[in-house]
């Protein structure tokens, strides 16, 4: 009985002592880790998206590259190289804008080639060029050339935010001077036409009002039209 009483008294003093103790001061913060943990493994790759639309069909038949050098009406000098890469898609235009024709009577070959600067559109993307080349006495010592080219709707842009609309028609029978055609060839197996041309145009014969120098590089595949049979309708 006395032992139990003694235990009760000791426990009471211990409880009183612990309840009267104050909290100790906080310890010092630990130092930050200096080594990063190991990166987790990469997740699984997502599914590839669908291929975007392209215009390979319009680019596969070659290009006409035009370089124009001159001075515009306000005195700004320019030297522009323009790559007309896109074949026309309209059937009517294609049949005269990407064609080769043979004339056995005159021993001549005629080429008509048109190309757009960008994807063809009715009005917004209509910057284009079209050229005609007729080679008479092809392959003979007296081989001659008749040549013309149209450039339509090309904007020359300057660093000072000026712009000049260049569009003109040039023809050996009208306003072309010093015409030189070189490296002409036509591969009848691939229907690939190659040639280079340079010429000059006098101030009064072009839209700049100044001397103009033009260089043309052609590497194009052309088609030969298949004529539909002539039919007659009974009366």
Image: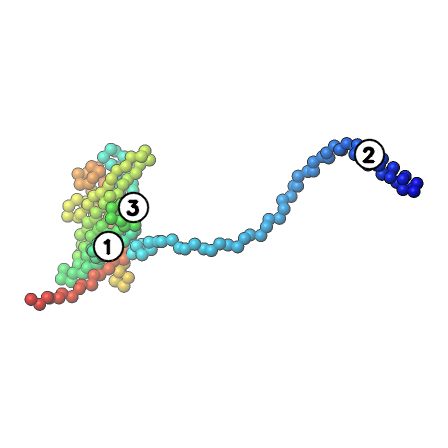
Residue 11: image quadrant is: top right
Label 2 secondary element: helix
Question: Residue 6: image x %, image y %?
Answer: 90, 39
Q: Give the crowd class for mark 2: few <14, some 14-19, many >=20 residues within 10 Å.
A: few
81 left or right of 11? left
Please identify the quadrant where the N terminus is shown. top right
Earlier sequence position, callout 2 versus callout 3: 2
Q: Residue 16 shows which numbered tag?
A: 2
Residue topped by disc 1: 90
Question: Residue 33: image x %, image y %?
Answer: 66, 41
User: At 24% from the left edge and 52% from the top edge, which residue is drawn?
Assistant: 114
Q: Give the vertical position of 83 relative to 231 (above or below).
A: above
233 or 16, nearer to the observer? 16
Residue topped by disc 3: 82
Residue 185 visible within the image: no
Callout 3 touching callout 1 (CB < 8 Å): no
């Amino acid at each position: 009985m006395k032992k139990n009483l003694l235990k009760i008294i000791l426990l009471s003093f211990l409880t009183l002592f612990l309840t009267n103790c104050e909290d100790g001061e906080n310890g010092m913060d630990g130092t930050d880790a200096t080594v990063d943990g190991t990166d987790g493994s990469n997740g699984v790759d997502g599914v590839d998206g669908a291929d975007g639309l392209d215009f390979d069909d319009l680019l596969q038949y070659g290009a006409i590259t035009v370089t124009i050098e001159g001075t515009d009406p306000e005195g700004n000098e320019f030297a522009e190289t323009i790559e007309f890469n896109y074949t026309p898609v309209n059937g009517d235009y294609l049949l005269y804008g990407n064609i080769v024709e043979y004339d056995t009577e005159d021993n001549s070959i005629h080429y008509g080639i048109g190309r757009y600067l960008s994807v063809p559109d009715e009005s917004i993307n209509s910057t284009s060029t079209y050229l005609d080349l007729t080679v008479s006495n092809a392959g003979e010592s007296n081989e001659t050339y008749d040549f013309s080219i149209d450039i339509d709707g090309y904007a020359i842009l300057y660093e000072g935010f000026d712009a000049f609309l260049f569009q003109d028609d040039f023809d050996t029978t009208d306003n072309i001077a010093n015409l030189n055609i070189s490296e002409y060839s036509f591969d009848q197996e691939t229907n690939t036409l190659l040639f280079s041309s340079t010429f000059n145009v006098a101030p009064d014969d072009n839209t700049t009002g100044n001397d103009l120098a033009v260089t043309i590089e052609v590497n194009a595949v052309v088609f030969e039209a298949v004529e539909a049979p002539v039919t007659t309708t009974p009366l």
